[in-house]
Image (cartoon, helix red, strand yellow):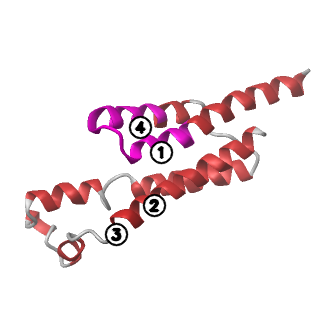
Amino acid sequence: MRAATLTRWAGWSMVGIGVLHTAFFLPHPYWRSWLSGDLWGGGGDPESVAVFWALPGGFVVVLVVLGLLVARLGRGGQTVPGYTGWVLGAWALVCVLLIGPSGFLLGLVPAGLLVTATMRARRESAAERE
């Protein structure tokens, strides 16, 4: 599989993780409180604030935007810098070490795809130079 294809798959897997995370936590009971403005001025209870930063205020939006960017680069035949996969994988592993087996394990999928894409891109580039 070509590096750009792996990059595209990594991007779409990040989007998928973000969408699944949102869908899983959509029925959470704090949404009504958040949407009514309880978080303004520190009015929400501490558990509500903590859950907010774990759900909509957390990584989901950034992960989806990063995934869309990565997928677009892959569609254009490009890859992302090699450190992207390594940092994403390290972040997922640290989170798993801190909270135990969880959805963070899914982060290893796009991380692995990006690391593999980087290695393939190097091989493809070397083969073109020969």
Q: Are the two marked residues, 1 and 2, in contact with CB atoms closer than 8 angstroms?
A: yes
Q: Secondary structure at mark 1?
A: helix
* Amino acid type at image mark 4: Ala
Residue for point 73% across, 46% down: 5
> Can you identify the residue that label 4 sits on?
92
Tag shown at residue 20: 2
Q: Position of residue 11 (x, y in %)?
A: 59, 50
* Amino acid type at image mark 2: Leu
> Can you identify the residue that label 1 sits on?
106
> Can you identify the residue that label 3 sits on?
26
Q: Secondary structure at mark 2?
A: helix
Q: Are the two marked residues, 1 and 3, in contact with CB atoms closer than 8 angstroms?
A: no
The crowding category of the residue bearing disc 3, from other C-alpha atoms within 10 Å (few below 14, some 14 to 19, many at least 20), is few
Q: Is residue 53 left or right of residue 15?
A: left
Residue for point 48% across, 34% down: 89
Q: Quadrant of the C terminus?
A: top right
Q: Position of residue 44 (x, y in %)?
A: 10, 66
Q: Which label's residue is closer to the chain start, 2 or 3?
A: 2
Q: CA distance from mark 4 to mark 3?
A: 22 Å
